[in-house]
Image (cartoon, grey):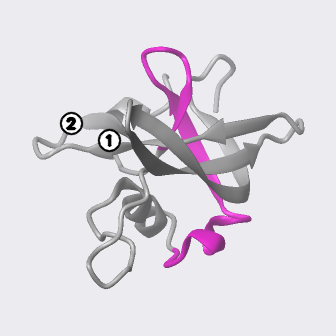
Amino acid sequence: MKIGSSRKDLKITNVESREVNTAPDKVATKAVLICSDPNGIDYQIDEAWILDRAGDPTHKGMWISTDPAGKLDARSVLVQVMKYLGVVTPAELIGKEMSTWPKENGYKAIIACEHEKFKDEE
């Protein structure tokens, strides 16, 4: 990775769930990955880059949603992140290394897909 690259490699140290007010009378739960870089700086990341139906990268929140059987919804962004990192439960994310790319606002989101956008600049 070159100096000034937009990509940042982090290690997941914990997985938390947090309630978020989405409307005046609505609360939803979001997964938050607590990560650290090699210098010991911690980050809290709750969004991931995935591919939309057209194959373009987009960032979405890691909302925790379940199917009628109580299992994590297979279509959720959290499950897509887990599949991308090769795990089957959120707890297995702890210790995994992953890369991030900044969103438009500068905050980091996990890269959970392959796309030329996320390649380091030459």
**Residue sitting farthest toward the front:** 25
Residue at image point 46% right, 36% down: 21
Above-or-below relation of 18 to 84? above
Q: Residues within 10 Å of mark 1 (few under 14, many from 20)?
A: some
Which numbered disc flags the more N-terminal residue, 1 or 2? 2
Residue at image point 57% right, 31% down: 7
Residue at image point 42% right, 16% down: 104
Which is closer to the viewer, label 1 or label 2?
2
Task: Give the x, y percent position of residue 77.
Answer: 36, 54
Q: Residues within 10 Å of mark 2 (few under 14, many from 20)?
A: few
Task: Give the x, y percent position of residue 48.
Answer: 44, 43
Q: Give the range drawn in magenta.
A: 87-110
The label number, if any, that marks residue 10 in the structure image: none
Q: Give the residue type at disc 2.
A: Asp
Left or right of 115? Residue 32 is: right
User: Which quarter of the figure has residue 92?
Assistant: bottom right
Above-or-below relation of 79 to 50? below
Left or right of 51? Residue 27 is: right
The residue that mark 2 highlights is 56
Camera-nearest residue between 55 and 63: 63
Q: Give the residue type at disc 1.
A: His
- The quarter of the rendered structure image containing the N terminus is top right
The stretch drawn in magenta includes residue 104:
yes
The label number, if any, that marks residue 115 in the structure image: 1
